[in-house]
Image (cartoon, grey):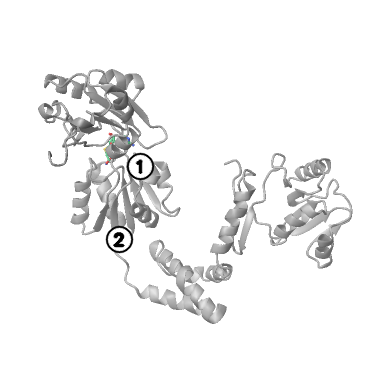
Amino acid sequence: MRHFPIFRDLRGRRVVVSGATETAVAKLRLILKTEATVTVYGKDPHPQIARWSSEGKLHLIDRPIDRGDAICAALVYGANEDAAEDARAAQIGRDAGALVNIVDNLGDSDFITPAIVDRDPVTVAIGTEGAAPVLARRIKAENEERLSPDLGVLARIGQSFRGEAESLPHGRPRRRFWARFYDEIGPRALTEGGEDAVRAALATLLAEMLNEQTEAGRVALIGAGPGDPELLTLKARRLLHEADVVIYDRLVSPEILELARREAIVIEVGKIPNGPSWKQADINALMVEHAATGAHVARLKSGDPAVFGRLDEEMDALDGAGIAFEIIPGITAAAAAAASIKVSWTRRGRNKSFRLMTGHDVDGFAEHDWRGLAQPGAAAAIYMGVRAARFVQGRLMIHGADPDTPVTAIENASRGDQKIVATTLAGLPDALASAGITGPAILFLGLAPREALDAADSIDTTHIPTAEAL
Ligand code: SAH
């Protein structure tokens, strides 16, 4: 983002326009909406500018801008339809410490004027940094249609009621008050009885909500998926957007956190392998503490919360504190990783079962049914397996696994920096090291990427058993 959008206070400030041209008219239509004092310099003024001047809306000075004319100006516009004259005006503006805009010349301007949807005091400003004016116009048209013309009136009345509304507790109750006002009660009152009815409706709504019992807090244990925000469920997305407090694991991607409301309290409770970590007990306490104040807590866990996510400990803590919770399943890393290499977890004629394993448990490298896993056709996803790769390889070989068994590592599945390493059991640790795989990664035992399969031994359909044979 090269241009940072801000709203500049122009009350009582000077805005100077150099050039009384048709180009200036277009900008002046916007500038005259503000409370600035506007001065236009230029000979042969456009009739509209002359009209505004005679109506007292701006000062028109019938000569080119000159040194000293921009003193104390907040903004200076160059709208001369003449590059040399605009450059001269820009210099005069900058010498006076003003921000300068040369119309239709992004490169030489300090700021750009966005397309505006005006529901004063609500203003939508749309900018594309000059990249796509057509798109800006379309977005403006869509917003003009979507935002009721009454919005400004409601917002102004709402603004005058903010002090009274502070008698509601901060956070969710106050937000619900305003949501109900803008979504239903305000628009209805305005249509039925005008502005006075809106004021009365606000007072009634406030009294009603002050009498309500405080709402109980709750926790949603949400699967945030493997990283790509498009792989979130709609429910996860909605609950995240509604949450007052978001507590998230290190592997939850920044793009997903963007979906939380700006006012939400957002807390990372990362557990870095072999690094500084939040203790599970502290995470549990944090959830309980926030939910106990009535907050809606979104506890975001990467992938699916029920896969190597210490979900049970969190559920036990919530039950223990009497806090209601629900679980929103997510796409587990192994599902995303399988999609990335275009293989299925199970396939007729190849494997009838598929295991989800961890490379690590509380005691270090995790032990498993190595004999079963060493059998031809066995297939598994190993989570947290990168550092355990040599251990896994050793155990499987001892139990007679074929050294040529395919193993595929998928690091950062579904993310922009995803990496795929296709190797064999014999080559596993070296392949991971030379590809620089440090995780988070899934190791697929017994599964090769579809392309590798096509190249090596394309699927022989005669060996796939029919439904009856199974
Ligand atoms: N609940 C999570 C797993 C948490 S354990 C899930 O269902 O996916 C953390 C491990 O998940 C990591 O060590 C890694 O093995 C795996 N993982 C998480 N995100 C991943 C991703 N985007 N790509 C590959 N592996 C990932």
Image quadrant occupied by the C terminus:
top left
Tag 2 residue: 217
Q: What amino acid type is highlighted by mark number 1?
A: Val
Q: Is residue 125 visible?
A: no
Q: Is residue 38 left or right of residue 461?
A: right
Q: Is the residue marked 2 within 8 Å of ligand 1, measured from its CB?
A: no
Tell me the quarter of the image containing the N terminus.
top right
Report which residue position mark 1 lands on. Answer: 252
Residue 390 position (above or below residue 336): above
Left or right relative to 228: residue 391? left
Compared to residue 35, the image places residue 371 above or below, namely above
x%, y% of residue 212? 34, 73
* Foreground residue among 9 and 304: 304
Counting residues from the start of the chain, the first of labels 1 and 2 encountered is 2
Front-most of residues 281 and 184: 184
Disc 1 on helix, strand or loop? loop
Between disc 1 and disc 2, the foreground one is: 1
Q: Which of the two residues, 392 or 280, is positioned nearer the viewer here?
A: 392
CA gap, disc 1 to disc 2?
Answer: 23 Å
Q: Is residue 266 visible?
A: yes
Residue 347, image quadrant:
top left
Q: Residue at x 31, y 29 (%)?
A: 449
Amino acid on which disc 2 is placed:
Gly
Splitting the image into 4 quarters, where does residue 296 fall?
bottom left
